[in-house]
Amino acid sequence: MEFPERNITVWEQRLCELENGNLVVIAWNEVLATGERLPNHYAISEDDGKSFCKPISTGIMGQASNLLHIGDNKVLALHCLRRDTGRPGIYGYIVDLANGIWDILSREIIWEPQIPVKADNSVASVFSFLKFGQPSAIKLKDGSYLVTNWVIEDGKGKIAWHNLEII
């Protein structure tokens, strides 16, 4: 994913393939020079990754994100919302990409931290809210989805898991 503007940093990009063969990449983006936080952006390739369209905003002010193709050119988009929200957590979006646009069909919170998320001033500001992250998902044999993410609680690192049914 390459932005036409300079100084935009792309963090933690993830990639998936849709059933029509298009590739979709998503990333968390920030302007490090100014500290400006940008919505997650996605880009689509219609030629097996040889080229991608310019990055397009999802409108979601998340950080680490992930995509899982769920059929019919739709994805389960998982986003860590740590800042810029009154309700931090892991959010799941069902997104239709059939027409190449980020068409959100539904949104649900999948996981919320048990304690308030506060900045840790001992680390770089871009990482100061890292208390949970890296959501990922797989489809299980029974048709449900297993979603995982890491979390730091009481100074201990843990893996949280959640079983989802997408209707």
Image (cartoon, helix red, strand yellow):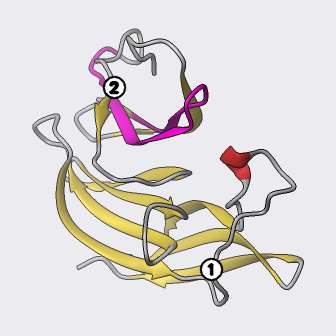
Magenta stretch contains residue 64: no
Q: Along the horizontal axis of the image, is 73 left or right of 88? A: left
Q: Along the horizontal axis of the image, is 32 left or right of 106? A: right
Q: Is residue 144 visible?
A: no
Considering the numbered disc 1 on the image, is that residue within a helix, a strand or a loop? strand
Marks 1 and 2 in Cβ contact (< 8 Å): no
Position above or below: 74 against 119: above
Image coords of residue 119 (percent x, y): 70, 64
Q: Which of the 4 quarters of the picture holds residue 159? A: bottom right
Q: Which of the 4 quarters of the picture holds residue 128? A: bottom right
* C-alpha gap between disc 1 and disc 2: 30 Å
Main SS category, magenta section:
strand
Q: Which mark is residue 161?
A: 1
Q: How crowded is mark 1: few (under 14 residues within 10 Å), some or many (20 or more)?
A: some
Residue depicted at x 56% and y 37%: 35
- Count of numbered circles in the view: 2
Image coords of residue 122 (percent x, y): 87, 55
Image coords of residue 74 (percent x, y): 24, 53
Q: Disc 2 marks which amino acid?
A: Pro
Q: Can residue 19 be seen in this view?
A: yes
Q: Give the range drawn in magenta.
A: 25-47
Q: Which mark is residue 148?
A: none
Residue depicted at x 54% and y 17%: 7
Q: Between 141 and 97, which is closer to the camera in this rendering?
A: 97
Image coords of residue 151 (percent x, y): 72, 73
Position above or below: 76 against 110: above
Considering the numbered disc 2 on the image, is that residue within a helix, a strand or a loop? loop
Instruction: Kindly report which numbered mark, 1 or 2, lies closer to the viewer in this rendering.
Output: 2
Q: In which quarter of the image is the N terminus?
A: top left
Position above or below: 111 against 129: below
Q: Name the residue under label 2.
A: 55
